[in-house]
Structures are given as structure tokens and as C-alpha cells.
Amino acid sequence: MPPLDDSITTRKRLAGLTGRRYWRSLDELARTPQFAAAMEREFPEVAVDALSPESRREFLKLMGASLALAGLTLTGCRWPRETIAPYAKRPQGFTPGQPAQYATAMELGGAAVGLLVTSYDGRPIKIEGNPLHPASRGATTAIHQASVLDLYDIDRASQVVQRQGGQTLQPGLEGFRQFASERFAGLRTRGGEGLALLLEETGSPTTLAMRAQLRDSMPLAQQFVYEPVSRDNQRQAMRRLYGRAYRPLLRLEGADVIASFDDDFLLLHPDGVRHAREFAARRNPDSGAMNRLYVLESTVSLTGTNADHRAALRPGQVALQLRILAARLFLKSGLSLPAGAEHLEGLLRVHMNDVNEHPLLEPLCKDLLRHRGRSLLTVGPRQTADVHVLAQLINDALGNVGKTVELVPDPRQDHGDRAQIEELAGQLKAGAISTLVIAGGNPVYNAPPELSVAGKLAGAETVIHLSQDENETSQHCSWLLPRAHYLEAWGDATGWDGTYSVIQPLIEPLYGGLSEIELLSMLISAEPRSGYELVRETYAQRFGEDDFEARWRTALHDGLVAGSASAPARPTPDYGRALTGTDLDGVRVYGEEAATDGFELAVVPDPRVYDGRFANNGWLQEAPDPLTKLTWDNAAVISVADAAAQGLRDGDVIELPPDSGVKLPVLVMPGQPRGVITVALGYGRQVCGRVGRGVGVNAYALRPQEHGGAAQVMQPRKTGRTHELACTQDHYVIDTLGMAERERRVGGLVREANLAFYHEHPDFAQKMTHHPPLKSLWTEHSYEGHRWALAIDLSSCIGCGACITACQAENNIPVVGKQRVLEGREMHWIRVDRYFTGDPAAPQSLSQPVACHHCEMAPCEQVCPVAATVHSSEGLNEMVYNRCVGTRYCANNCPYKVRRFNYFNYQKGITETQKLGFNPEVTVRSRGVMEKCTYCVQRIQGAKIDAGNEQRPLEDGEITPACAQACPARAITFGDLNDPDSAVRKLHDHQRAYAMLAELNVKPRTAYLAKLRNPAPGTPEYETPPPELYEHAEEHDEHAGHAGEGDGHAAAGEGEGH
Amino acid sequence: MAVPLFRRQFDSTEVVNTADDALARPELITGGKTFADVTNIVSRIAEAPSPPRIWWPLFLGSVALVGVLFSMIIYLVVTGIGVWGVNTPVSWGFAIVNFVFWVGIGHAGTLISAILFLFRQKWRTGINRFAEAMTIFAVMCAAIFPGIHVGRVWLVHYLFPLPNQMSLWPNFRSPLLWDVFAVGTYFTVSLLFWYMGMIPDLATFRDRARTRTRQIVYGLLAIGWRGSNRQWLHYEKAYLLLAALATPLVISVHSVVSFDFATSQLPGWHTSIFPPYFVAGAIFGGFAMVVTLAIPARELFGLKNIITLHHLENMNKIILATGMMVGYAYMMEFFTAWYSGNPAEGFAFVNRALGPYAWAYWIMIGCNVLAPQLFWFKRARTSIWAMLGVVMCVNVGMWFERFVIVVSSLSRDFLPSGWDYYTPTMVDILTFAGSFGLFFMLFLLFVRFAPLVAMAEVKSVMPQAHPHFDEHKPLGDYWGDAPGAHEEQERLARAEGGRS
């Protein structure tokens, strides 16, 4: 019996501790020898008087302390301790862990696309298109998908920074407010004298209203708008034609014949998502007549690769061809010139029987005349205003204006980006500006370098930069204000067609940022108002005060105000003013031979990092360029013939122009016109976050003097150095043997035919492979209930790659970096294979999205030694990450090579902020496991649970994988094969459907629908040899019948269901 | 006088016993050795106070390489499989190539000891012991690679059918699992076979031991062998049974390894010729390694009278024969690819010979098909330097064969969009080099401390072993003469009796 004293002492010690101090002191208490001794005796000797209430309490305290001690010593052994803060009162209709979707919009280049953002417990994690929004209809681009990553970017500007006399201070937002109230008050009293603002192009009614207010309240303040990537030439053309700027709104669904002159309207256009949708909708001959696309372009563009007829020409030639076309139409074919344009007849006569005429013009001319009012011409931003005017003239003459080309008012009416930034630079140089406010934008990086904006910024006393990240410009500014991400701040925007959307935030600004309207409000008034108030006010002004709250809520809920698109205008063109004779001669036309007069440059915005503002976005940096498949770089894209002539190979570094210091690696591209070098903007950021810093080369220095206008001619100089280019396809130079084999195989993998051939042989795609009847080695699975499947219509797919980034966002797919891409270890679960066939100078290109095919007889499942990849009862090929040991045998045995292995721990060093962006529904994979497309199993299960809770069967279309949801072309369809009415069942049964590599008897669940082209009769493309078919397929079918097995000639849908 | 690097410790002169006389069978042990001579020659290697001078640099070099191997493995486990050159189409690289290479090497030993035993090939006795040791060590090297090549080494026990709370079995359809069983069984049986064969010789070592340590160690290893008739009776039965058990394993293990490739559907792997082709290749490569090791061993340890030119010539003949089989398999692969009419298959082989990995393919053809043709000539078969050249070629060629099969097939499979080129990293190369370190380290320890030649078996094929031999010549002292230990040996000989 141990002495009682011990426990009594302990009790005394415990009794002396009360309240909070008690808990804090447990540690100390636990360390006393008395306590330790008491603990050793399993039950402290307090039982003596345990029955008295007082001592019983002591006992419990002591036991509590012993439990706490156990906790203290064992924590960290396995499970981390977590602080859980459950709702004391749960908000109505809110279930923690249940995702919610909010409508908002993202503006880029002055036009907005409506979005739906999925939010988990207040964290936006995934972006989808808003099905109600005309510019989206549920789809997005890769940039929209990736914008959520910018929100959680750890390199964002997170502090208000003040630079003063070589010192860098962090005064906080309050510090700025103090400074601003004083400085702006002074400016207001002087009517804004000495104040200048450099702004970005916007269609936001609130922002525009604020800018107008500023103009009213400070008449002396100057506002400049500079957008490095814009359709300025088009805008100027419209101003010349109609006296004010209009946007041409392309109605592609009504266009049977589309002619693009250097316009990548499917990808590099603010309204590209809608274009892609409408264009793709007309590529399916089973639901209406197919359209026909002619593209004459000076680079390889996504639109060009989707063309039925394509001509790759030097930029001047493209303009020339349009003039020859005009001559043909108006002079030869009897199309009459619109009123007011008669003076052009004489000018066009020069181009009668022009030797430069491209053979493509003849069928185009015929097609245009045959489809008056159902055709359209569009011209790209690199062509001069004259070319745009001429195209509009032809559209007008063909009766397309108002039908396929509608004109809507452009919110921007100024003299053009180049003029604006030049004027600002001039004013700065003259010292006329004491306070410069740069809202967004990065002129030091993206303004024409000859203006040397960086140096001139010093001319202003105060430069305030509102920016999402600390960039090249912020370094030269006295104030850097963190700008709120669009998911953090209130705003509004209009689509390309004028549809009004409210941008509603989903999360408090992570770094306390401001929006542009909030900053403008600080300028305008001594009592600045919040973005929320400002947007509501605009809404009230625009749509009236009646029933305001209800309609405001509807607008927030829907993400747009229905019917708010601008009414199409029918302004009267003034051709006399817009097109004088001399304009037409202004275009320099170079011959087809590049050798003598050097190369012309086509400087294009990048489909991933755009103008450079997304350079710190890892998803976009790693998203392969849709055409070159290049990641983490830009390059000087050059034609095959020129490369051979100049002795250049992929990766050779050239200097453009010589001694300019702009050194770019060469990328040889089939289809690139001779004599043209294409360079993408947006790279070579020097002051940027850790992702984008120093990636690629800044091409703004290469932009021609006339903003976005005619190309420059220069002769590149070889530097003798090489630079490795990380492409996700054709990782290395392929030898002739490999190229020949690739050429031979492509036809079977990506099946295609011309429309006429399809009409003769509607089931051609199913007769293209030849193999003996197939027998299964195992008993096949039976699928009761659901049978999930995918169908991809290659005729619709434009190859933009939005699916890749959508999948990455949905499935927490890591970014691996350039080095890993070079090593062939990119992690994308879906890839878009791109093949070229035919003449490298004028190839036909094919795009084919490939993800896991969820084979019914999956070769991966058979070889996994630990059964980590298994078949579900619904036919999904599932990866059990916990079970995977990483033998990689499955990847070897996968004929589609869609499995991705975690060669390293790609989640290492992920910060808490970045973790917020993960999709909690999808496991974050560890190093050493295999991963691959799951058909978005989390979405399937979510929908099944919802349907189960509501006690109803699942409906077709209820489940959409991320790739299908993002697809602007609606090329991907998901559903249940066991449902005879499902869309996917119909597509699998479709006569164009085929299974890739069906001869392996893996029975893939993804079916492809053969691609169709619609070339004009009589053209070489029309005469392309049709695919080789095995017409005697029926004989084998009989054998197959005996064998009781499906035959490879059968459609993907057949041969299943054993 | 400078000390020669090779200190000839033992009398050893080459006797040409390769005459092609059909009537007179060549002597298997030359130099008119007695039983005692054999015992002395073999035992002295382990009993010598110091090994031949070259042993130390070789051993220390090997140990250094083992250090490299384990450093590379630790680096790999800490960092991830990405430290190797494997990429998305080529998910298997050096690790699997090395695995198949070492398993192949591990073929000759058990083949010599089991199959040749069943076929009563008496010449096997001179070489079987160290060939078996080579097998054990090669399989140990081989076993490292599938272990470390998985992404999560710490979960590698999932491959074994261990009972677990989730009632999860491994996937019995997977050839990788068959590998686990095949290699595991092969290793176990080969080890037993090797050890069992060594027991009488270990007892000899024990009996000749001059130090307490040696007595205890060899005594424990000899597990009470006394050489009684009864023991010999059981021993020989067990040996025969084990030989019968090991024989199918020799065939099965590499057949199963080949299933890793043959049962997959990758063009270039999916070939039914693989099992016999792999077995022939393994014997080919294994014998080449035996010859590679035998030549320096007999030179260094004075074993030229036991491992005679006749032995080497016999092995060279096997190398020639299996080399031809391998060459035939290479040819048949092309024929089958063409005859099947499967375009993917056809391309896989054309690509092997003419594609980006053509260099590896032609190294393989040169080393495996062309080089052994030299063995048609008796002069080449019996010339030490010529055979050393050829077997070195075969060693290289057989590694490249596996490289060609694994890498060239994977790098260009069905979808041209996924094609990529595989280049090994420094870690790949150092790990491979390190595995040689492990192999040679173990082998050098073996030659230093274990009976390098199966003394008891060799004696059984000597003329003295013939029942009527003593009618012509006096029987030699079976126990041989350890230096300065005549009396003791005589006492022992009297006590235990010898085998006759």
C-alpha cells in the first residue's frame, strides 16, 4: 500500500488549479514526479474516499489528466490532431461537403464568357461554362478552366507595396487608402490635371460607367486603353465603314460556306467558344447539311487545320487573294458592288486574271455566289483595316450582313491600342503626367519596346499599379496594389454579343485585393463605394428599379440577364470613305519564294498564356499547344521547306532579326507557309512567379510597328546553339521508317472520308480494318445495370485541347514541368493526338482525343499482379491507388498508352493555399502509383447517389465528365450503353462509329465517330483517294457467327453484351 | 624480381585432352592426379593463408560497386522511379532488362548440375559447383531488380499471397505473379541443390581444418556428414531426386519470365516462340558466363587439371548449339511477323532492325549469332583467348537481346502519337554496374571460402573410382595430404574409412 501522501499532494496541486490555467498547466503537472508516480499505479490511490463528492471530482480530474497525457505523448504517432469547427447553427440548405455552383463570368479581351463555378465549403475549385450564356453554352476554353489556378497562385501580389526612394514598404491597404484620400482629393480639386490612367479593354458596364464618371468629374485626367491582344484593325475598319465601331457577330450555324482570311475564329477569338460550338454543330451530316470552311492563312491555326480547303500563304498574299476574290466576284461573276462602292471597280480590275490567283478561289467564288446570305467572310486581326473593310464589302454584297454577320455596337470606340500607348508614352516623356494609374496591364512587358515605357514611367511622380501579380511593370511603380481575382470581387461584364452578366465573387479576396471599379471609385469620390454597391447601381440603372431584388437575384442565379444581348444594328456603310484606291495598294505582297527577301513574321497570341498574363499558370504552361504540341515554351515556327533550305532543325536557335538579341528555337511545322515565321506572344516574362519566369522568349519586340498589322521582313541568323523543346507528341525526331509507318497507320486510327464518299459508304469506318474473327480468352463480364461509355465525334472535334485542362482541374492532375515533359512523363489523363497526312507543305491534319478506353477486356487488368486495376460491375476500369505498387506492367500492356505513372512525388511542397484548389472528390495520388482517366467516376457516383436519394432512375445526360463538359464543340458524349435511348448508345450504334484498335479484341468502351470533310467538288481535296475498305467483310461475319463472337468489322457497339 | 600479379600457388599445367578420338574417351582429370591430389588442389584454395594477390583488388572493387548499388537503391527509394530513364511508352527499362539478364545467367548452373547429371554427363563434375554458385548469385542479383523497380517498394509484399484482413489475393492471371513463384521456386531449389551437393566437400574442409573457427564453421555447414555408406546412399538418392525436381524448373523459370512478354499484347513481345527462345538464350548466356568465370578461376587457382580444356570445349560446343538456336529464333521472329500478316507485328521487327534502336539490334546479332560461329573451328574452341573473346561477346549480346526486346518494342507500339525514345540515366547504369559488383563480391567470397570444385563428385569420375582400378594400381590416399598433417589424416582415414 503506497503512502496516501502522494496522491493527496497531487490532489492538492490539482485543486489549486482552476479554469483555463488548469488546462494550460497540465503539461507542467504531468512532469512532476508525484504525478508520474501516481500515474504508474494504474489507479491513483484515491479510492479511499472516492465516494465523497469532492474527491470523486478530483479523481475524474486526475483521470482526465492521464488521458491528456496519453494524448500528449502519442500525438503525431499516426493521426494529426485536427480542429473541427462544426456549425452551431447550420445555414439553411447548406450541407458541409456538398458542392454548390454559382454563376459568374470571366472577361478577357473585352468580352465575357459566362461560367458556373463549383465551390466546396467556400472554396471555388472547378470552372464550367454557363449553359445559359450564349458565349459559352456550357463550354469553356483551357484558359477559363485554368483561371481557378490563378486564384490560388502563391506568387500573386499579396501585399500593398510602396516603393519610395529606393525603399520598399508594405503599408497595407489602409496605408494606401490614407495616401489615396489625400492624393486623389488634390487631383479632384484640380480637375484631374496631371492624372492619367492606363486601362484594359472592357465591356463591363460598371467599369465603363466609372470611367465615364471619372471623365466627367476630372475632365483633365486622361484615359488610355491598351490591350496587347485585340482586334483593333477590325475595329478601325468598322469605324471607317460605319462611323463608329461595331463587332461582327458571326452566326456560324446559318453559314453554309465560311471563308476565313487569317482569322483563327475557333480559338483565338473572344467569342471562340460560341464559334466552335456553332461550327462543330454543322460538321455532322446526319443532322443537317455540312458547312464548308475555306481558310487562307499565314500561319498554322486551329481554324486552318479544321478547314476543308486551306491555303498557306504569306500575310500579304492572303490580303491579295481577298482582292482577287473580290475581282472575281464583282467583275467576272456578276455580283454587283454595293451602293457607294462603285469606285472600286476600276481598282479591282487590276486583279482580273491575276497570276497570283490561288486555285482555291475558284470553288470559293462559286460557293459564295451559290450561298448568298448563307455564307460569311471573316478576316483576322493581323490583317490591316483595309482587308477587313473589303471582306465586309463582300459580305454586304453577298447579303450576309444581318444574316450570318450581324453587327453589334462595340463598347470601345477609341483610336486603337497602338495610338493610345504611344500617346501615353509621349505624355510621360513630356512630363505632363504626375500621377499614373495602371489598372491591370503590364506595359513594360507588352508595350512596343521602342516606346521604352519602363524608362518613361520614372517621368511620373506617382505610378499606381493595380495588378494580380508583381510583374515587369510593378517594379517601376511607386505603388503596387493587389488586384482581386474575378472569383474574389464584384463586377459585371458583357459578352461579345453584349449579353450582360454579373461577376459575383465566390470567396473573400485571399490577399485583400481591390478591383478596378473599387480603385476608380477611390479616385472619383472621397467616400469610395464597394464593388457590390457599384454593380448593383449599374444593374438598377440599366434594367430599372422595379422589382429590383427579385430580378437581381435571378441575374445572379442565371449568371446573365436573358435577352440583354445588344440588338444587331444595320448601319449604312460608307465605302467611299472606308476604301480609297490607295489603301488597296498599301499591302506589300511578297512572292512565294522566301530565300531572297527574308521571312515575314506572324506574331500571334498564345492559346495558353494569351498575352503573357497567364504565364504563371502551370496548367496552361503545361497544356500542349493544340497544333505544335509544344509546352513550356514558344518557338519560331517555320515551314518544312524553309527549314530544309536554311538547314534548320527543331531546337536550333535563331536570332530574329540578326543582332536584335531575340533568340528563338526553331520548330518545324507541316502546313506552315513558306517564308513565314510564326512566334507566339506571352512568353519570356522576366518578373513573374516561379512558374512562368524565364519561360520562352518575349516576342513583343518582334511585333510590327503597326499594331497587329502587316508583317515585317527579316532574315534570321543561326546562332549555332540549340534549345530543347518539350512537346507532348513526337518527343523526338522520328526517322523515315517511323514516319512511313505513322503515315500508314493514321488512316486506321483516325478514320475519315469526304462527305461524298460517306454518302456512298455510310459504314465505311467499320470496314477499314481486316482481321480474323476474335475470340475472348476469358469469360466476359456481364453488365447489368449501367454500362458507362463514351463516344467522341471526330467530325466535331476541333482539337482545341480544352478537355485536357478541364480534366486536369477536375482530377487534381499534377503539373510536372518542362524537364519531365522532355522525359516523356506528362501526366494528362486525356491527350489530343494530332496527326498530319499528305504533303508536308499542305497537309491535312487530324485531331483525336485519347483517354482511357475502359476496355471490357482490359489488357491492363489482366497483367496487374496485385489486382490494383480492376473492372467494375458497370464496366469502368478502375484504379485502386491504395493497392497499386507501381509495376507499370499495365502501362506497357495498354495499347492506347493512356496510363500515367507518378515517377516522383509531384505533390511535394504544395502549400496550404494551393491545397484549397484541389477537388476533394478526387484522391491526390502519391508517388509510385499509376493513374489514368476514370470517366470522372466521382461525378458518376455523385449523380447515382443523388438519384438514389431522390428515388428515381438516372437520366441520360445527367452525368458529364469534365472533358465532355468543357468541350466547346460538343464532340464528347457520355452515358449508359444499357439505356437503349441514351445518346451514347445511339452514337455507338451509329454507322460512323468505330473502335480504335478493335482488332486487339480489347472491346473499348470509347467509340470514335469517323471524321468527315466536305471539300468542294472538282477540287484536288475532293479527289483525295478514299479510305481502303474491306468489302468482303460479310464472309468473316459468317465465321464470326459460328464462333459466337463479335467480329472486328462490327461497330464498337456490336460484339458486346455477351 | 618483381612480384607477379598472379602468384601461381599451385602446380598447374595445361594438358590438351581434346583429341577427337571416338574410341578413347578423353581424361576428365589430367595430369595423372590421385584422389589425394584432387583434395589437395581444391582444399588448398580455401586453406591458403592469403588468397592470390589479384583477389584483393577484385574483391575491394566489387565491394565498392556493391556500395554503389546500394547507394543507388537508397537514392531510388527516397526519390522515386523518376531517377531512371523510364517514361510513358517505355515503362520498363534497365531494371527489367537486368532482371531477365541475370535470371538468364542463372540458368547454366542448375542445368549443368541437374540436367547433365540426369544425362550422365560425367564432365559436368569439374564445373558444376561453381556454376551452381554462379546461378545462386545471379538469381540473387536478378531478384533485386523486380523488387526495386516497383513504384512503392514498401508495399512489395502485396505481390505475395499473404493472408490479410481484406481477403485480397494477388491477381493470378498476371505473369508478374507467376514470376514471383517461378523465380522463388527456382532460387530455393537451386540453393538446396547447391548446398546439398557441397555437404561432403564441406565435411572434407572440416576435417582438414587447422583452426577452431574453421572447424566450427565448416562443422556446422557439414551438418554431421561422416561419409558413411548409409549417408552416401541417402545422399545420392536425394541428389537424384533434387536433380529431377530442378530439371523442369530450369525449363520453367525462363519460360515464365518470357511470359511477362509473351502473354502481353505488345507487338514484339506477343510471340509464342518466346519460352523456348528464352530458355535457349538463357542456357547460351549462362554457359558463356560459366566459361567467363572458369577461365580466370582455373588459371588463378591451379585447376587446369580439373577444369580441363575438354570441359571448356564441351561448353563452347553448347554455346555454339544454343547460339544457333537463338539465331534461329531471331530469324523465326521475323518470319512469323511476316507470315502472320499482322502489320503491327511486322513493323515491330522491321523497326528493331532498322529503327532508332537498330544499333542495339545489330550489337545483339553480332554478339549472339555471329561471334559464336567461331566455335565451328576447333582451334577457336580450344584456345583460351579466342573463347574468352567469344564468351565476352555473348555476355554483352545477351544483355542487349533483353534490351532490344524490352525497349524497342515498348518505344513504338500501336499509336504513333505515343512513341518515345528511351535513354537510360546515370542511375540506371550505375545500378546495373553495381549488380555486377554484388555478383562478383559473392563469387569471390565463394571461391575463397567454399569448395570451388565438387571434390567428391570429381573423384567419382576419375579412373581410380572404377571398382577394378586397384587391380592395376595402388589406391591413392583419399583424404589427400594437408600440409604437415599426415599423421592426423591417417588417423582420420582409419577412423572414418574412405569411399571406394
Image (tube, coloured by chain):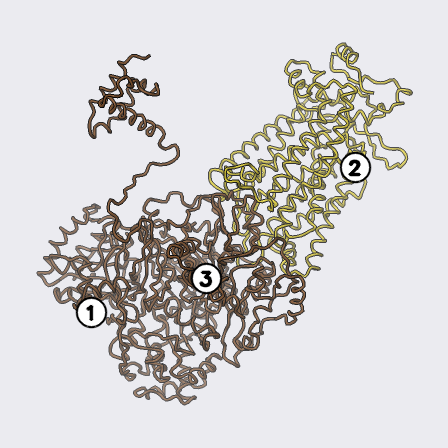
Chain colours: A brown, B yellow
Q: Circle 3 marks a residue in which chain?
A: A
Q: With A1029 as the anchor, is A226 left or right in this view? A: left
Q: CA distance from mark 2 to mark 1?
A: 101 Å
Relative height, residue A539 to residue A828 (above, below): below
Q: Nearer the viewer, residue A419 or B67?
A: B67
Quadrant location of the N terminus of chain A in the rendered image = top left
Q: Amino acid at mark 1?
A: Phe
Q: Nearer the viewer, residue A1000 or B440?
A: A1000
Q: In the displayed orientation, state which residue is furthest to the front.
A: A51
Which residue is painted at 69% across and 59% down in the image? Answer: B340
How far across and how far down the image is residue B56, in percent? 62, 25
Number of other residues with Cα within 10 Å of mark 2, as a class: few under 14, some 14 to 19, many 20 or more: some
* Helix, strand or loop under label 2: helix
How far across and how far down the image is residue A47, in percent? 29, 19
Q: With A89 as the anchor, is B461 left or right in this view? A: right
Q: Which residue is mark 1?
A: A543
Q: With A861 as the anchor, is B296 left or right in this view? A: right
Quadrant location of the C terminus of chain A in the rendered image = bottom right
Image depth: mark 3 or mark 1 in front: 3
Which disc number belongs to residue A974? 3
Number of other residues with Cα within 10 Å of mark 3, as a class: few under 14, some 14 to 19, many 20 or more: many
Q: In the displayed orientation, state which residue is furthest to the left.
A: A189
* Helix, strand or loop under label 1: helix
Q: Amino acid at mark 3?
A: Phe
Relative height, residue A586 to residue A550 (above, below): below
Q: Circle 1 marks a residue in which chain?
A: A
Q: Which residue is mark 2?
A: B314
